[in-house]
Amino acid sequence: MMGRQLAPRERTEVINLEDFVPKDHLLRAIDRYLDLAEFRAHLIGFYSHIGRPSVDPELIIRMLIIGYCYGIRSERRLCEEVHLNLAYRWFCHLGIHDRVPDHSTFSKTRHGRFRDCDAFRELFESVLRRCIAEGLVGGEGFATDASVIKADVRRQHAVRGAHDINWGNAAQWTRPVREYLAALDAANAPAEPPKSISLTDPAASWTATAGPAIFAYSTNYLVDVQGGIIVDVEPSSSSHAAESRATQTMIDRVEQRFQMKPHRLIGDTAYGSASMLAWLVDHKGIEPHVPVWNRSERKDGMFVVSDFIWDEQANVYHCPGGQLLRSQWRAYTNPRTHVTKAATIIYRASQADCGRCSLKPQCCLNTTFRKIARSIHEDARDVARRIMNTTQYQQSRHQRKKVEMLFAHLKCILKLDRLRLRGLTGAHDEFLLAATAQNLRRLAKQLCSGGMNPVPSAS
C-alpha cells in the first residue's frame, strides 16, 4: 500500500546563504578586501541610463574572479558552477532564486565593454593599491621573469613567415588578424619575418623554449620580493628581446602610476644583455642583480676576454703576452666611432705581434690575429659583475624563486597553461585577470587569521 502523497509547501522558506558559507572560506577573505568602487566609477561612461538594464559589471567581475581563483577556464561551465555552488552565489551577491547571467551575455560583456575601456587593468591596479595600503609591497626590490603560455591555435594552421600571405577578404578578418595587421602598419621599420605564422592567431610566437615548437605568448611578471605581490604584468612575444622590453615597460608604468622605483632588479640571464643593463644602470639608476650575458667564456683552455686587461685611459686592451689591442691603428682624417651594428667596438691586435707570439696557439689558433668585441655598454656590464660578488646578490638569487613559484601556481592551480582567448589583447586580458586572482589570494591568506578552506567547484 502506497503512503499518503505529501502536500506541496504553502510557504517559501527564506534561505540565508550566509549560513552555508564556512567562516574560513577563501572567498570570505577575498570579499573582505575586494573593493570595486573604483572599478564601477571607471565603467560608468560605458553604460546607458535608458533602455533595458544591463548585467551588473560587478557581477561579471566577481564571477571572473571565481573562475580564475579556482581554475574554471570555460565561461559556460563558470555560469553553471555559480548557479550550483552556494559559496559562489554568496560571493556574487546573488540570492538563492536570482538568475545567473547566460554564458553568451557574459561573454559579450567581457569581450565588449570591458575590453574597450581596459577594465581589467583598472581592476588589477585597484587590487594592487589595496596591497600597497596594507603594507604588503615594500618597493625596495623587484624580481622579473617570463613564462611561456600556449596560444589557442594548432600547429597545422601555420605558414612560412617569409612567404606572402593571402589573408582573404578584409571584411571577414577575425579580431586577432586585424590587430596583427594594424600593428604591422603602425611599425616604424619592418621586422624580420618569423619562421612560422599562425593564420588563426598571427601575433603568437613560434617558439621551442619549453620543448617541441609551439605557438605561444609570454606572460611577464614584475614581483615585489617583500610579500610576493605582482606589481605589474605584461604580455609579449616569446623572445629575450621582447621580454626585456616588457620589463622596461612595467618598470616605467609602476613608477608613473604608483611612484615606486625599485633599488634593485632581480632577473635571470635573459635580462643580462648589455642594452638592458645599460638601461637599468644609466637610465633608471637601478642596481641590476642579474647575471651578465657573456658568450665569450670557453672551456677548451683558450684565452677569454677576462684574461685581457682593459686600460680605459689609453683605450686599449693588454693581452697576456704584453701586446696591445687597439680599436684603430692609424689616424683618420674624419674621426670614426668604430661602433658596429651590434653596438660594439672591435679591438684588434697587430698581425705581426700575434705571428711571433709563443701564446698564439692558446689565443688565436685559427686566425692571424686576436680581436675583442667590446660593448659600448661595458661600464654597465662591469657594474653588474661587481654586484655578482656581493652577499646581497646571493640573497637576490633566492628571492627570485618567488616569481617562479607564482608561475607554477599560475599553471598548476589556476590552470592557465593554455590561453582561451586569441590575439595580444586576449593574452593581455587573461594575464591581467590571473595576476589579479593571485594577488587577491595572497592578500586574503596573509591578512586573514586562521587557515583558508579553498572549497572545490561543485562539479
Image (tube, helix red, strand yellow):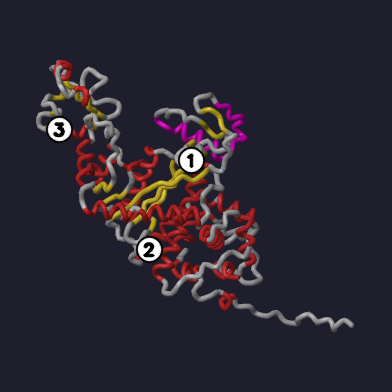
Taking the magenta stretch, the answer to whether it contains residue 168 is: yes
Q: Work out how far the residue at label 3 is from the one at label 1, CA to CA, in angstroms.
A: 40 Å
Q: Which residue is mark 3?
A: 310
In the rendered structure, the answer to whether residue 208 lies left or right of residue 305 reads right
Q: Position of residue 65 (x, y in %)?
A: 52, 60
Q: Residues within 10 Å of mark 2 (few under 14, many from 20)?
A: many
Amino acid on which the number 1 mark rests in the picture: Gly
Q: Work out how far the residue at label 1 is from the one at label 2, CA to CA, in angstroms.
A: 36 Å
Which residue lies at the image location 23% right of the left edge and 47% below the top edge?
Answer: 388
Q: Secondary structure at mark 1?
A: loop
Dominant secondary structure of the residues highlighted in magenta in the image: helix
Image mark for residue 211: 1
Which residue lies at the image location 39% right of the left edge and 70% below the top edge?
Answer: 447
Q: Work out how far the residue at label 2 is from the one at label 3, CA to CA, in angstroms.
A: 47 Å
- Judged from this view, the residue extending furthest toward the right is 1
Amino acid on which the number 2 mark rests in the picture: Cys
Image quadrant where residue 441 sits = bottom left
Label 3 vs 1, first from the N-terminus: 1
Q: Is residue 325 visible?
A: yes
Q: Position of residue 8 (x, y in %)?
A: 78, 80
Q: Which residues are magenta?
A: 165-188
> Closer to us: mark 2 or mark 3?
3
> Closer to us: mark 1 or mark 2?
1
Q: Position of residue 419 (x, y in %)?
A: 53, 47
Image mark for residue 131: 2
- Position of 318 relative to 43 (above/below): above
Q: Is residue 57 visible?
A: no
Q: Secondary structure at mark 3?
A: strand
Q: Nearer the viewer, residue 122 or 453?
A: 453
Which residue lies at the image location 24% right of the left edge and 28% below the top edge?
Answer: 373
CB contact under 8 Å: marks 1 and 2: no
